Amino acid sequence: MSVLDSIIEGVREDLAQRRQPLGRLQEAIDQAAPVRDPLESLLVCQMSVIAEVKRASPSKGALARIEDPAALAQQYEIAGASVISVLTERRRFGGSLADLDAVRSRVNIPILRKDFMIDEYQFYEARAHGADVVLLIVAALSQSQLNDFHQLAEGLGMRALVEVHTHDELERALEISPQIVGINSRNLKTLEVDSKSFAELIPKIPTNLVRVAESGISTRADVEFAQNQGATAILVGEALVRAGDPAAAMRELLGADRI
């Protein structure tokens, strides 16, 4: 069993425990904060930041305690993040829907629910808890699921960050006409990072789309490399949560590119 398969198995088990009638979620959706479209903020700058609230990862273990995820998210917003990514997967990343609720209550910019979305219930759940964006991992989904989940997200008013790791996955992603495509340089089956993925795949993404470089970004040089390949946004978690001053860390990563 690959790491990805193992994570998804745990996600299914946790989902089965918390699943409730869809009608209750619909009531929460009706009362949720209005959707904030991330495209507006992601296209404003030469290089935008999706800043992540992330306690742990399968590859690195515990990263930071983050006792107040809302306060951290607020620091990101003040520092100029375009989107806040909130991990909600519990077993490997230490996240929760409570983190999503806390962040939504404190920030005014779009929020990405970062989880392994493998059931339509999770999309209603994401919107009910105030998410504006959801993650679609191509490697975890069949083509019919990818298409159906993308349509479901948009039907609920959300955008989807469609994440790929290989040429084949990128071809599959482009078939559903996404607006935000992420290249994850970390292989979720082995957890190995290879930044060459940025050079190989980002130039193949149409330039009218938001092109996000994910994983393995911890230095200014990493950002410059991704940007030189055509990335218009970076998703950063570990480098920010481990920094004593997340805002300063973000400024260091961006250098003079922020406009």
Image (tube, grey):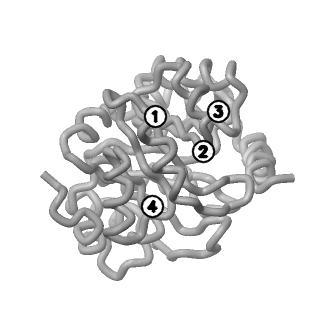
Mark 1 element type:
helix
Pick whichever of labels 4 and 2 is earlier in the sequence: 4
- What residue is pinned by disc 2? 165
Mark 2 element type:
loop
Q: Amino acid at mark 3?
A: Asp
Pick whichever of labels 4 and 3 is earlier in the sequence: 4
Pick whichever of labels 1 and 2 is earlier in the sequence: 2
Please state which of residues 65 and 24 is positioned toward the viewer in this rendering: 65
Q: Residues within 10 Å of mark 2 (few under 14, many from 20)?
A: many
Q: CA distance from mark 3 to mark 1?
A: 12 Å
Q: CA distance from mark 4 to mark 3?
A: 30 Å
Q: Residues within 10 Å of mark 4 (few under 14, many from 20)?
A: many
- What residue is pinned by disc 3? 168
The image quarter containing residue 209 is top left
- What residue is pinned by disc 4? 53
Mark 4 element type:
strand
Please state which of residues 113 and 48 is positioned toward the viewer in this rendering: 48
- What residue is pinned by disc 1? 204
Q: Amino acid at mark 4?
A: Val
Label 1 or label 2, whichever lies nearer to me, is: 1
Question: From the viewer's perspective, is residue 2 above or below residue 27?
Answer: below
Where's residue 3, x and y in %?
Answer: 76, 56
Mark 3 element type:
helix
